[in-house]
Image (tube, rainbow, N blue to C red):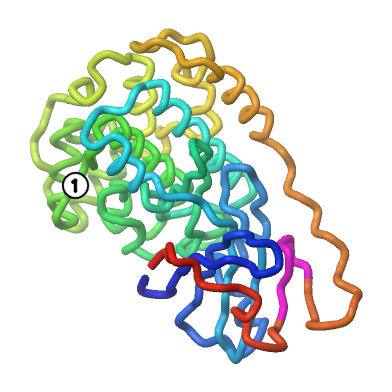
Amino acid sequence: EGMYATVVEMVRKSNGQRVAVKRMKKKYNGWDQCAKLREIKSLVRLRHPNIVKLQEVVREKNTLYLVFEHLDRNLFEYLQKECQGKPMEPLMVRNFMFQILQGVFYMHSRGFFHRDLKPENILLRGEQVRIADFGLAREIRSRPPYTEYISTRWYRAPEILLRMPKYGPPVDLWACGAIMGELFTTNPIFPGSSETDQLHKVCALLGSPTHQTWPFGMSRAKQIKFSFPSFKVNRMSEIIPKCPQALQLMQALLRYDPRRRVTAGQALRYPFFQVGTDLPVEKKGGEEMLLNSLASDVLRPPATPAAAHSGGGAPRRRLGVTAVKDAQGPVLASMVLNARHKP
């Protein structure tokens, strides 16, 4: 149960396929209104192995349903159940971050940025990653000002914490850095209780920004009468004490100045992701095959929408998903609620 929608796990009667059905709380009177929904606008154009697949969009009695592929759990649940407070091995961090950054790179290359990356929005099937929940996604070409209060606070970039009206794709890379730190520690690295406390925790770990490292941020802080706490030491090595390649990448993802923050494409070329790089644990069999197979999909073009449905029954419009349609009967009649429903 969320603020804008309810998600339940269901099973298609026709083939036993499990799906996740998202029921929007807002009422939609027509398809023109539905087409403006950010989640639909983005996902019909984003077809990539590391982005969740939107299978079907259905409107029934002004209620909108989004039908997604089903995945086992999210990254937060994985950290809680599998790691149980124990640090994740660098090889596993590399696997997860490689896939997350591939999805982000593709998303940005297609003209969207997510704005709400966090472990709960990273879905897993085994060790395969899908980025999900595009409800806050924006087109890169859209004009500012943007919403100030976006993304979960712990993964919010400093330019948003300072309420800058203009920001862009670098906010997703900051979130990736925060997620990467959490994979190593199994705990949020910036667990602020307020926006002010959030900035305090960022400075305590990274050291405070200066006029040299983030001139525009310092000017913005002065404009809104905010004083950065004084922390001179960067303590990132305490989080990753034995993996310099990972530390190098995290430092690049968590730069204060968004203009100097690494892009997703640049991040994917960092030594941390080079197969054969010595990491401080024994290699697991099959990792090179996994990374190489994933790398081949980095720039895979989106699937071409299928031809329009020409048979009888409910009218359908193809928009890069299985079907977009007005329901002729109860939309959930073709599915049954799974006992393992997802609130």
For image coordinates 52% across by 27% down, the residue present is 268
Is 238 or 290 nearer to us in this picture? Answer: 290
For image coordinates 18% across by 22% down, the residue present is 238
Q: Residues within 10 Å of mark 1 (few under 14, many from 20)?
A: some
Quarter of the picture holding the C terminus: bottom left
Find residue 19 and report its image quarter: bottom right
Find residue 249 and report its image quarter: top left
Asked whether, in this view, residue 120 is left or right of residue 10, the answer is left
Asked whether, in this view, residue 284 is left or right of residue 61, the answer is left
Q: Is residue 21 magenta?
A: no
| Helix, strand or loop for disc 1 | loop
Location of residue 58 in the rendering, given as x and y in whole percent from the top left corner: 65, 77
- Residue that label 1 marks: 191
| Count of residue discs | 1
Give the magenta-colored segment's residue range.
Answer: 318-325
Asked whether, in this view, residue 287 is left or right of residue 325, the answer is left
Above or below, 313 against 100 in this view is below
For image coordinates 91% across by 74% down, the residue present is 310
